[in-house]
Amino acid sequence: MAGVATASAIQQQTSAPIRLKWPNDILLNGKKLAGILCECLVEPDTTPAIIVGIGINLNHSHFPEEIRDIATSLKVETGKIISHTDLARQLLQNMNSEYEDFLQGKLTSLMQKWTQQSDLFGKTITVYHKDRSLTGQAIGLDLHGKLILQTPDGIQEHLDSGEVSFNSG
């Protein structure tokens, strides 16, 4: 939900060709533009909550050498200064809209939006998950947002986290 809302907000403000990389990256021209972190809070006698943190590289001009080839900003890519306020307003409107859809049970629509903004599916990838790595074809997301990875032996793994690397060839 946060990825879809963020990607849409950036596109609405800049028309930039944003792509989603599972589970929590937003890419522009193959480089990381933004990241999303979610923390679930569950305590006795309270309503569960999720804290969402979204970091977007807006007006950075320079990056440290060690990340220069993998990170970018909207200013670098578009040549324009981006208004923090305008983008934040659009992002909050999109988050509210996506959350309303979520509350109405429109999970299939949300997964379709996410899938349409991703170049992941149909590709052979390696996912580094916990203490192992799995290689296979990314075939989709389930209704919980888990990545469905089909391994060469035909097993479908449903992964809720991990780091994705694209395999060449």
Image (cartoon, helix red, strand yellow):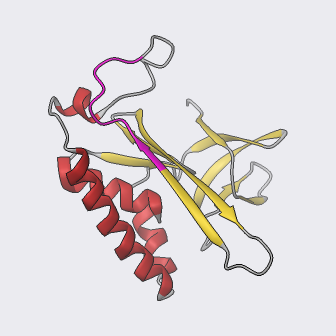
Q: Can you see residue 141?
A: no
Residue 160: x, y in percent? 69, 58
Question: From what the image shows, is residue 15 above or below residue 33?
Answer: below
Q: Main secondary structure of the magenta part?
A: loop
Question: From what the image shows, is residue 35 above or below residue 102?
Answer: above
Query: Who is closer to the viewer here, 45 or 92?
Result: 45
Q: Classify residue 73 by image quadrant.
A: top left
Residue 97: x, y in percent? 35, 75
Query: Who is closer to the viewer here, 54 or 150?
Result: 54
Residue 142: x, y in percent? 62, 69
Range drawn in magenta = 54-63
Question: From what the image shows, is residue 33 above or below residue 68?
Answer: below
In the rendered view, does 150 fall on the left or right side of 109? right
Residue 72: x, y in percent? 36, 28
Quarter of the image that includes the C terminus: top right
Name the residue rendered at 63%, 49% in the picture: 137
In the rendered view, does 44 fall on the left or right side of 7? right
In the rendered view, does 45 fall on the left or right side of 113? right
Residue farthest toward the left in the current orientation of the protein: 80
Q: Can you see residue 85?
A: yes
Residue farthest toward the front in the current orientation of the protein: 45
Residue farthest toward the top in the current orientation of the protein: 65
